[in-house]
Structures are given as structure tokens and as C-alpha cells.
Amino acid sequence: MDMVKSNYAHIKEIKEYAINNKIPIMKPEGIDFLTTFIIKHQITNVLEIGTAIGYSAIMMTLCNPNLKVTTIERDEERYLEAVKNIKKMQLEDRITLIFNDALKTKLDDKYDLIFIDAAKSQNIKFFELFERNLIDGGFIITDNMYFHGLVHKNEKEIKSRNVRGIVRKIKDYIVFLKNNSNYNTAIYDVGDGIAVSEKKAKGGA
Ligand code: SAH
Ligand code: MG
């Protein structure tokens, strides 16, 4: 009997670990959207902010055999779990894990997709720090634009001051994206709300 577990079994385990440890990995709807997008736009080089335990990075690499992901995580326990998961699936040569605070990370490479899925109140900072790593015509995708539906709720109904603060920051980020004339942004009603910002190609060419 072949004792090597199938990818499917590993993914099932990763999802179970996420549930048991309350790790906010992308929902199936969001993963479907992201992987369909990657295939449609022939994305091959992704930068992800917020690895958690490697689930979304793994799902992205599995949908396109030519795709590589570089992904950043600041939480040590999650980073170590991601290392384990990526090893189990033998994706070490396609997924590069960086254990650091993304806001303290400077990268030189260029990517055709940057996926922002980290601290929701820092989205403008992540965008401004990493857009220099995006190719012309590339995309920045941001997850959790609805923040569990709270972005569309009356602020008075949100009890926690901290949560209200995050919701305000997400609203600021929406304004920032809409006003950013270097990008065309659309927010899709998928999963927890997904923003796709397409960097306009430089004019005059
Ligand atoms: N993309 C993952 C889920 C990420 S959850 C998936 O769908 O599978 C968000 C993660 O971002 C958390 O693990 C959190 O520790 C990490 N994070 C938040 N702020 C960060 C920062 N400034 N730098 C690096 N990681 C950060
Ligand atoms: Mg998310």
C-alpha cells in the first residue's frame, strides 16, 4: 500500500487545523475566485502578504503548475505550521516563505499578482509598500473587504471600539483604491468581499 497521502488528504487536514485553531483562512468561494482569476490571467509570480498556515499559497500553486508564490507571515507558530504543510505537499521549490513583519520587509523582485490578506487595518500601508514590486498591468487583490459583513453595518451597532476602528480603516482603504488613478479597482461580492485593482499600463508605449 502506498503510504504517501494524497494532496486532497493534506488539504483536508490543513482546513481542519484552521478550524480547530481559529485561523481565518480563505473560504472556498474566495479560493475559487482567486484560482479562477490566476488561470484566466495566466499569473505565474505571486506575492502574498499573510501566509497564516500556507493554505491559500498552496491552493494558488496547485491551480497553475507554472506558478510560484512568495509569502510573508509574522506569527512564528503559523509560519512554522506553513513550513510543515508546504513540505508535506512537496511544494518547497515553488513557495518561498518569509518569516517577518511585512511592513519591515523589502523585496526586489517583481510580481504579476500581489495578494493582500494580513492585518486589515494596514491595507493602505501594504499597498503603498509593495506596489513598487508589481509589474505594469499587474494586479493587487485584497481579501476581507466586507470584514465579516461589518463594513456594511451601521457603526452604532458595532459594540467593540477596536472592531469599529478596523471597519473605518477598511472604508478608508476603499476610498484610497477608488481615488487611485494608477489602478482600476472593482470590489466583488464574493466570500468576504474581494477587491481587484489592476495597475494601468504606462501610457505612451
Ligand atoms: N492567506 C491565508 C490567511 C491569512 S490570515 C489563507 O487564506 O490561507 C492573516 C495572516 O496575516 C495572519 O496569520 C497574521 O499573523 C498575518 N499578518 C498580519 N499582519 C501581518 C504583517 N504585518 N506581516 C506579516 N503577516 C501579518
Ligand atoms: Mg482573508
Image (tube, grey):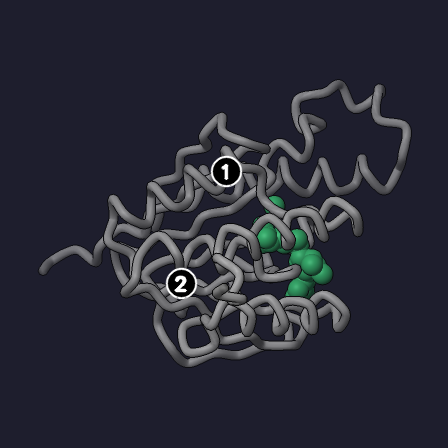
Element class at badge 2:
strand
Q: Residue at x 84, y 21 (%)?
A: 156
On whether ligand 2 comes within 8 Å of the CB at mark 1, the answer is: yes
Q: Residue at x 60, y 66 (%)?
A: 85
Q: Earlier in the sequence, mark 1 or mark 2?
A: 1
Q: Residue at x 85, y 42 (%)?
A: 162
Instruction: Give the residue at mark 2.
Output: 46
Residue 62 percent location from the top left of the image = 39, 56
- Classify 10 Å Cα crowding around label 1: few (below 14), some (14-19), many (20 and above): many
Position of 202 relative to 76 (above/below): above
Horizontal relation, residue 119 to residue 125: left or right: right
Question: Which residue type does callout 1 highlight?
Answer: Gly
Question: Which residue type does callout 2 highlight?
Answer: Val
In what quadrant of the picture does the C terminus appear? bottom left
Residue 103 percent location from the top left of the image = 63, 70
Residue 70 percent location from the top left of the image = 47, 70
Numbered tag placed on residue 30 in the rendering: 1
